[in-house]
Each structure stands twice: as C-alpha cells, then as structure tokens.
Amino acid sequence: MRHETWDIGAAAPACHPGSALPAGTGVGDTVNMAVPPDCLKMRIGDMVDHHALQRYRRLEEVTITWRGSFGYLIAWDGFLPGMNEQIKLCRIEYLGDDEDWAFAIYDPATETYVPGRLSTGQDTGHPHQAFDTAAIIHLARYTA
C-alpha cells in the first residue's frame, strides 16, 4: 500500500496521449468503450485510497478492481487484528475524461450496482466524490 500526497483540486498530469484505447470487439465486449490507461488507474487508486484514509483512519485501505471501463471500490476494515472485512462501496465508470466519471452505488440487498447521483447533486464527477458518496451509506458506523 502506497500513500502519496495528492492535491485533489489540482489537475493531474496526463497519462500517455492516446492510451485510452477502445476495448476489443470480442463476444461480451462493448464496442468503443473507453478504457482508462494503466497509469490513470494507478493514479486514481492512489488518490482515492489517500483521500479515504484521511477521513476514515480505521480503514486499512481502499482498493479499486478494474474490469474494462469500470472500477469497483472496496474498503478494507483492518481495525481488529486478523479481521479484514471487505466493504463493497460503489462502481465508477471511465467516460474518457480523467476528472469526470459515472457513478453507481453498491446495493448489498440485491448485490448489484445501481446508478445514482453523487452527494454533489451531479450525475458524474471525480472518483473521490464517488467514494465520499458511498461512504455516507456504507461507512456510516465509522468515525471520520
């Protein structure tokens, strides 16, 4: 786990131009789906993890698992030794812009991701805003 200091309000350096290539066109793939480049995935993962741990110190970390244009945010509760609870939070979707991502909240009752609005009132936003919105629901028992 790597924690770096990020200025969330500052524009992040761009990844390699043209690296967000469309996904393949095989069975089950979505044609022309924007896929974030690996350097962006790493940067977003580090930024969200750092942002989350500043607010929820009880968490061990926040990870993002990637599938195509989708990133799945998971919080790890490492408060008790030997107990590492996984808390599914939300899904973000890369729309081709490093700063503007779609959002869906995880619904544990149906074990699905439901499109929703961010706590900012917007339909799309930065992944740290997706974390903040999901944390209101899924991390309510944690102290900020």
Image (cartoon, rainbow, N blue to C red):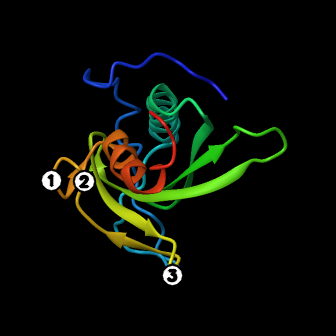
Q: Are marks 2 and 3 in contact (CB under 8 Å)?
A: no
In this picture, residue 125 sits left or right of residue 62? left
The residue type indicated by label 3 comes to Gly
Neighbours of disc 3 within 10 Å: few (<14), some (14-19), many (20+): few
Amino acid type at image mark 1:
Gly
Return the disc, 2 or 3, that comes first in the chain's sequence: 3
Mark 2 against mark 3, which lies toward the viewer? 2
- Residue, x 31% and y 40% (percent of image)? 98
Label 2, on which residue?
Answer: 118
- Local crowd size for mark 1, using a 10 Å CA cut-off: few (<14), some (14–19), many (≥20): few
For the question of whether residue 70 can be seen, the reply is no
Q: Residue at x 18, y 47 (%)?
A: 120
| Separation of residues labelled 1 and 3 (CA atoms) | 32 Å
Which of these two is toward me, 94 or 118?
A: 118
Q: Quadrant of the N terminus?
A: top right
**What residue is rendered at 32% in x and 59% in y?**
103
* Mark 1 residue element: loop
Q: Observer-nearest residue: 100 or 129?
A: 129
- Seen from this angle, which residue lies furthest right? 82
Q: Could you say which is closer to the camera, residue 22 or residue 42?
A: 42
* Residue 47 screen position, x and y as percent: 45, 31
Secondary element under disc 3, as helix, strand or loop, is loop
**Any part of residue 45 in sight:** yes
> Where residue 143 is drawn, which disc sits there?
none
Circles 1 and 2, Cβ within 8 Å, touching? The answer is yes
How far is the residue under mark 2 from the one under mark 3? Answer: 29 Å
Q: Which residue is mark 3?
A: 28
Residue 143 pos. (x, y %): 48, 36
| Quadrant location of the C terminus in the rendered image | top left
Figure check: 89 above or below 52: below
In the rendered image, residue 83, in percent from the top left (x then y), is placed at: 79, 47
Task: Name the residue beneath numbered marker 1.
Answer: 121
